[in-house]
Each structure stands twice: as C-alpha cells, then as structure tokens.
Amino acid sequence: MLPILVLILCLSLTNCTHTELVSVPRTIEVTGSSEMAVQPDQIKLEIVIDTKTGVNKESKFLKILNKNGVTDDKIAFESANNYNWHWYYSNYYNRSEQKYTITLDSTVNSLQLMEDLKLSWVRSINVTDRTNSEIQEYRKQVKVQAVKSAKEKAGYMLLALDEEIGRVISVEEINADVNKNDPYYYWNQNNQNNVLSNSMLSSYQSNQGTVQGVAMQTLRHEVKIVFEIK
C-alpha cells in the first residue's frame, strides 16, 4: 500500500511542476493603416459627340483639342453609330454619334479643355483610365508606413500599462490598395474617405507633373501585427 501512495504523490508533484512551467504567452495584437492620395500623370478620356447633319462637328471638335495642346497622335477614333427612332404619328428622328479616346498628360490644361468642351453636341466625357509612373513606389511607401503605424500603436498602448514591446510574432496583410474614386463625367477633387487611417501620407507630386483636376485613387494599406510583451 505504501509504494502505491508514494507513486501517487510523485505523479501529483510532477503534474504540479508541469503546470507551473506552462505559461500563457504575453502578446498584443494591433492593426496599422496608411493612406496616400495620388494624382495621375496620364489619363484617357472617352468622348462621345453628336454628329447629326447641319454642322461639321468633327472639325470643330478636333480644333478644340488642338487648341488645348492635344496633338493628333493622342487622338484615337473609336466608332461611329447611327440611331433611328420612329415616333408616334410617323415623326422621324435621327441621331449620329462618334466616339473618341483622348490621351492627356501634364502638358495639357485639362481644366480649360473641359470648359471648352461644354457644348450641347458633346454628349459625354468619361475617364476610362488613369496611371502614374511612380505608382509602385507610392504603394511601397504606404505599406511601410502601415507597419510603422502598427508598431507605434502597440508601443503607446503598452506604455500605458508600464510594459514594453517585444519581438514580432506575426504580420498579416488585411487589405490592399483601395480605389475610392470612380470615374465619371467631369472632375472631382473633394473625395472624402469613409475609412480613417492611422497615417495620411503625401505623394509630394508637383502640379506641373500631373493631370490637374482629377484624382487617380487613394492608396490604402492595412496590416495586423502580433507583438510579444517583454
């Protein structure tokens, strides 16, 4: 009987010792985010003009483009369509349209061009594409800043608890770039972001190097990082 009691006692002590050695890891999980508004240095416009008979609209349209610095190599004719409707009482109405793709860069005064194209026979103007030659570098800056923001947040949260941030346990990307500016007729410089970020970066773009009056997109990056607590 005594040997059995001794064995039970030894097993109990072993279990107690094992429980004491297993400690819960002390960590803190935080998110960090960053944003940057980027303007394009080149955009493409899809312009549809009404070319019904009566006035040579095509010639007037091309003269307006050339006057504003859009050279012929930046103008591409896309298509021409004829639409016919038969109304009640045999009234007949005809409408003809031509579609062009125009490439603009910083050499063109885009705002003045839009003013000159406010004509009754210009049916629609849409931004179909926008690019920036430095977009990859801007994306990298936003991602780096998001990580820095997460580390800064973890630091001041632990400081309030008289604790210190330790090594990184894990890093997770939550989302990538978000384009919050949908293309539509005319320009929009007053886009408001619905999501707040820890950091707002500037792309330090020169007005002389970008197409003015239209925002390309808002680059936003968010990360989730788990840090060890020392």
Image: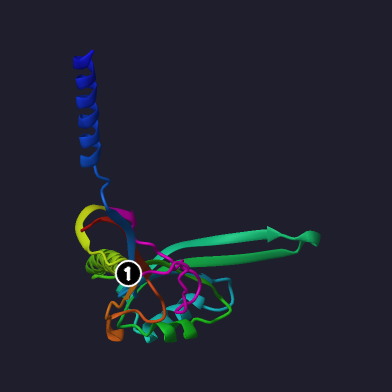
Bounds of the magenta span? 172-198
Name the element at disc 1: loop
Which of the 4 image quarters holds residue 50? bottom right
Question: Does residue 57 show up?
Answer: yes
Q: Most extreme residue toward the top, as rendered?
A: 1
| Residue at screen point 20% across, 21% down | 6
Q: Is residue 35 left or right of residue 58?
A: left
| Magenta stretch: includes residue 102 | no
Residue sitting farthest toward the right: 89
Residue 130 placement (x, y as % from top left): 35, 68
Label 1: how many Cα within 10 Å (few below 14, some 14–19, many 20+): few
Furthest toward the front, the residue is 2
Q: Which residue is mark 1?
A: 160
Q: Which quadrant: the C terminus?
A: bottom left
Q: Residue at x 22, y 68 (%)?
A: 137
Image x and y of residue 21, in percent: 20, 41
Name the spot of residue 123 as percent of width and height, x first. Answer: 55, 72
Question: Is any part of residue 75 visible from this angle?
Answer: no
Q: Quadrant of residue 206?
A: bottom left
Residue at x 28%, y 70% (from the top left corner): 132
81 or 54, nearer to the observer:
81
Q: Residue 184 lies in magenta, yes or no?
A: yes
